[in-house]
Image (spheres, rainbow, N blue to C red):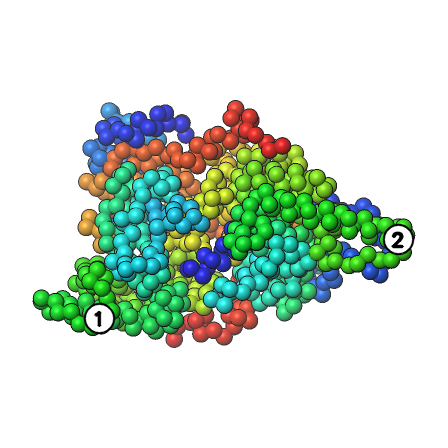
């Protein structure tokens, strides 16, 4: 338990925030040595698939719509129709009468593959969750540490998760780049990478960076030091960006010296890397939004954000999403004021709220996490029907990842990522029966592959029946 | 639900507004496997007078319409740490474990329990009436120390019974304090029990070369005399089997806490009458001790006849925070994975009192029993459900907490909420 608690400290105790991503307007200039900003290539291939018609379900479309006894038609990995009495020709029919269908769940905050299960004493001193040697490790890419055989991936999939983001931990001001993947069986992270998905930049405010570095006699050891550190780094990145802009525009002959940290920070300045900020307190969140604004950087999402409800109108006004737990509070001073109505109050202010997991256990319960948060809101007098609450783990999460045009919404043209639930997904008794990713059955609770163990779990006597 | 007025008055009141009739509810009494539907529960003098279907309430009764609602005994958290820690990251507010000094088995967490902790208040308004609080692994020996039973119907003297069970942490989590091997834990446990047995046999006690100091020696005696159990925190099958063997060899009672792989030893556990307090949410190999974790652990153990109670850890968070809701969520998951509903309910309302040997086990709704009950706004095993009324000793308690006050201060429609600072 001590080990695990220490490990949790690495994760939640250091939070991350994300910013909404604005597509870069500028065309990419041709230059062999400019900072690499494009999404790295993916070797993901969809699993074998056939055209499928899911019929007779209660459909929550992910953006607030609800259809009773509805059908969803998938063709060649895309959704091509959502409605009633859709044509069956050429499609495998899944009778979902009495069942519910939602978009695939999207988890914007995990440490899968780096907070590798099982955790052991070996991870207490050396962990891949974060490179902790410097408060600015913007040059690190978390994908370089991800082990696809982490059992957490398969648990997420069997719980309805079809897309997830892996972020660095939260002890550094600039924690490095994130990666967005699909939790399918794979051997390399490239095979899981969501094609075309942008990386993000993980940042962290508050207690974690200050305590992590301050306790080692290093900078920063205070909140004000953190902000000073961020401002200083972005000033440097601005200078770097201008040098590259001048070079690209032909105003200087020699290419600037390449710097991996400044590559990442200047990409954030250009709006090419969505910014995700770990931050708990309302005062901290407001300060960091201002600090980022000073450099024209928009915060995509603030993660953990247990006090977001205190500044819900500000978050809505600034278009900053909040990725939260429904009920975690108290385990650290920054979390003392957490309340179960946090998500609902953000929603009520017109803000963008998302449920996130941070730990593998919660990543297998995101539908229940959303259920709890919505129920607390209803009890506080707010109208949050299921078709709205589902947005917190689908379309709102897609927006955080900059993928809202592809996932999180059941509509023609969208990726065919969806879950057939045994019942109301907000009931503790319901289970994901079928999980489709890009139109392929990635998980079938009643199928032969439903118990596919990870490589780690394969052949372990503890997993087998008692003889 | 109408908002209750002057909750502080209710809190302070020791006068029962008698009689009270709760009508129209689905009542789970824990005396049968099915609920009493459309029941009227009559409370008077702090006790339950009757539970009858479709009974008209007594004319003088205060009537609580509970149509469509569910009534159960209050929650009993079989293993938590409420009242022992305020802010887990602030060590001066954390009294869960002894890290150094002379106390080993003699460490008694009841002496550090604070009835004013927000974790206690939150558990109470979530429908938790009783709880066991247990120590975390020690930094100076294999024994974590003594657990205590809490009664949250009280406001100050919430420790109902101290020294309820002696905790030892087995497996990888405890190995380092034993010298670096789980085998050394068992070596030290065996030795401690042997030394306590020798001390008891020789009167007057003749000191010899021994590892235990007198405080630890005396602390172990009640375990040896089978007055209280040895609670072994163990996940791995091998450690669970070692715990059962120690129980047999020394003739002591053993309770397994954690038990991620207990399903693999179900036959042995039932034959030795060893109960298991497990986490129904476990299904990941979070450590090398719990590679065999699975969500139907509860179902397999219960089918075999093992007495089970639930604890929900949430990687440590839920042992202190959101204890009530987490327990219900865990029980719901157990039902979703095959455990009969009534057994899941008992695992969070009744079994802890049996496992920890309460003199007058609570957790049953029946005429003559103390009027401890919760009225839920739906199925209590759905975590979306919440209490609408809680009666402890026949008195309705306030559901106000620091969290509800924060909620009301920042509620979107409230004046305070509107004027709340919006940063800049």
Q: Camera-side residue: B376 or A82?
A: B376
SS at mark 1 in the image: loop
| Residue at left offset 39%, top offset 35% | B401
Crowding near pointer 2: few (<14 within 10 Å), some, many (20+)? Answer: few
Residue at the disc numbered 1? B210
Which mark is drawn over residue B5?
A: none
Question: Is A283 placed above or below A456 here?
Answer: above
Residue B145 placement (x, y as % from top left): 29, 58
Residue at the disc numbered 2? A252
| Residue at left offset 28%, top offset 70% | B188
Taking the view exactly as shown, the residue that stands out farthest to the front is A217
Q: Do the residues labelled 2 and 1 touch (CB within 8 Å)?
A: no
Residue A154 placement (x, y as % from top left): 56, 62
Q: In which quarter of the image is residue B18?
A: top left
Residue B197 placement (x, y as % from top left): 17, 69
Residue A84 placement (x, y as % from top left): 65, 45
């Amino acid at each position: 338990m001590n080990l695990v608690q220490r490990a949790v400290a690495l994760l939640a105790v250091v939070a991350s925030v994300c910013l909404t991503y604005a597509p870069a307007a500028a065309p990419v200039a041709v230059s062999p040595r400019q900072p690499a900003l494009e999404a790295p290539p993916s070797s993901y291939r969809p699993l074998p698939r056939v055209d499928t018609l899911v019929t007779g379900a209660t459909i929550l479309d992910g953006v607030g719509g609800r259809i009773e006894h509805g059908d969803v038609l998938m063709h060649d990995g895309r959704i091509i129709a959502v409605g009633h009495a859709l044509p069956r020709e050429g499609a495998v029919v899944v009778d979902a009468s009495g069942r519910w269908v939602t978009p695939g769940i999207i988890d914007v905050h995990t440490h899968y593959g780096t907070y590798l299960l099982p955790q052991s004493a070996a991870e207490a001193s050396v962990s891949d969750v974060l490179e902790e040697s410097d408060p600015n490790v913007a040059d690190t890419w978390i994908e370089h540490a991800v082990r696809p055989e982490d059992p957490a991936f398969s648990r997420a999939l069997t719980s309805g998760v079809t897309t997830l983001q892996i972020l660095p931990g939260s002890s550094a001001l600039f924690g490095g780049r994130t990666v967005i993947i699909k939790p399918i069986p794979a051997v390399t992270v490239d095979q899981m990478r969501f094609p075309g998905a942008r990386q993000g930049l993980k940042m962290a405010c508050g207690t974690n960076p200050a305590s992590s570095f301050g306790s080692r006699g290093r900078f920063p050891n205070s909140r004000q030091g953190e902000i000073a550190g961020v401002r200083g780094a972005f000033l440097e990145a601005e200078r770097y960006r201008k040098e590259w802009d001048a070079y690209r525009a032909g105003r200087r002959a020699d290419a600037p010296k390449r710097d991996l940290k400044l590559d990442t920070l200047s990409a954030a300045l250009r709006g090419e890397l969505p910014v995700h900020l770990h931050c708990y307190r309302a005062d901290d969140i407001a300060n960091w939004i201002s600090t980022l604004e000073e450099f024209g950087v928009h915060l995509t999402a603030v993660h953990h954000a247990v006090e977001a409800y205190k500044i819900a109108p500000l978050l809505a006004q600034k278009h900053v999403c909040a990725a939260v737990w429904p009920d975690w509070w108290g385990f650290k001073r920054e979390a003392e004021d957490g309340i179960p109505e946090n998500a609902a109050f953000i929603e009520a202010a017109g803000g963008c709220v998302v449920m996130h997991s941070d730990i593998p256990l919660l990543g297998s319960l995101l539908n229940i996490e959303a259920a709890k948060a919505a129920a607390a809101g209803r009890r506080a007098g707010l109208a949050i029907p299921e078709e709205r609450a589902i947005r917190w783990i689908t379309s709102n999460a897609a927006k955080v990842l900059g993928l809202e045009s592809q996932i999180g919404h059941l509509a023609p043209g969208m990726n065919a990522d969806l879950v057939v639930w045994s019942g109301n997904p907000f009931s503790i008794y319901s289970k994901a029966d079928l999980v489709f990713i890009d139109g392929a059955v990635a998980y079938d609770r009643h199928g032969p592959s439903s118990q596919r163990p990870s490589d780690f779990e394969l052949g372990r006597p503890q997993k087998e029946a008692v003889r | 639900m109408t908002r209750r007025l002057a909750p502080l008055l209710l809190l302070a009141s020791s006068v029962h507004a008698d009689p009270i009739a709760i009508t129209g509810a689905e009542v789970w009494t824990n005396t049968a496997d099915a609920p009493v539907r459309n029941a009227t529960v009559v409370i008077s003098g702090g006790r339950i007078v009757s539970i009858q279907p479709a009974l008209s309430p007594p004319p003088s009764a205060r009537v609580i319409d509970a149509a469509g609602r569910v009534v159960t005994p209050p929650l009993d958290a079989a293993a938590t740490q409420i009242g022992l820690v305020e802010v887990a990251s602030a060590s001066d507010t954390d009294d869960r474990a002894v890290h150094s000094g002379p106390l080993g088995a003699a460490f008694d967490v009841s002496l550090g329990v604070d009835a004013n902790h927000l974790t206690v208040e939150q558990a109470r308004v979530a429908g938790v009436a009783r709880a066991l609080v247990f120590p975390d692994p020690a930094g100076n020996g294999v024994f974590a120390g003594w657990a205590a039973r809490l009664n949250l119907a009280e406001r100050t003297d919430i420790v109902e019974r101290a020294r309820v069970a002696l905790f030892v942490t087995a497996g990888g989590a405890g190995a380092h304090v034993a010298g670096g091997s789980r085998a050394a834990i068992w070596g030290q446990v065996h030795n401690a029990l042997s030394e306590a047995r020798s001390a008891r046999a020789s009167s007057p006690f003749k000191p010899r070369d021994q590892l235990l100091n007198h405080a630890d020696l005396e602390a172990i005696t009640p375990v040896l005399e089978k007055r209280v159990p040895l609670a072994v925190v163990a996940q791995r099958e091998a450690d669970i089997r070692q715990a059962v063997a120690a129980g047999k060899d020394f003739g002591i009672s053993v309770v397994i806490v954690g038990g991620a792989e207990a399903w693999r030893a179900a036959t042995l556990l039932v034959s030795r009458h060893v109960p298991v307090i497990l986490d129904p949410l476990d299904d990941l190999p979070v450590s090398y001790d719990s590679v065999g974790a699975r969500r139907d652990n509860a179902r397999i153990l219960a089918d075999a006849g093992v007495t089970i109670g639930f604890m929900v850890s949430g990687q440590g968070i839920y042992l202190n925070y959101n204890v009530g809701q987490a327990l219900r969520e865990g029980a719901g998951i157990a039902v979703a994975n095959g455990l009969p509903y009534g057994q899941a309910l008992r695992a969070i309302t009744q079994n802890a009192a049996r496992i920890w040997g309460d003199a007058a086990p609570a957790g049953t709704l029946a005429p003559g029993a103390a009027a401890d009950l919760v009225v839920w706004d739906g199925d209590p095993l759905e975590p979306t459900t919440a209490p609408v009324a809680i009666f402890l000793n026949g008195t309705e308690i306030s559901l106000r907490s620091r969290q509800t006050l924060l909620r009301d201060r920042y509620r979107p429609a409230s004046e305070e909420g509107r004027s709340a600072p919006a940063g800049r």
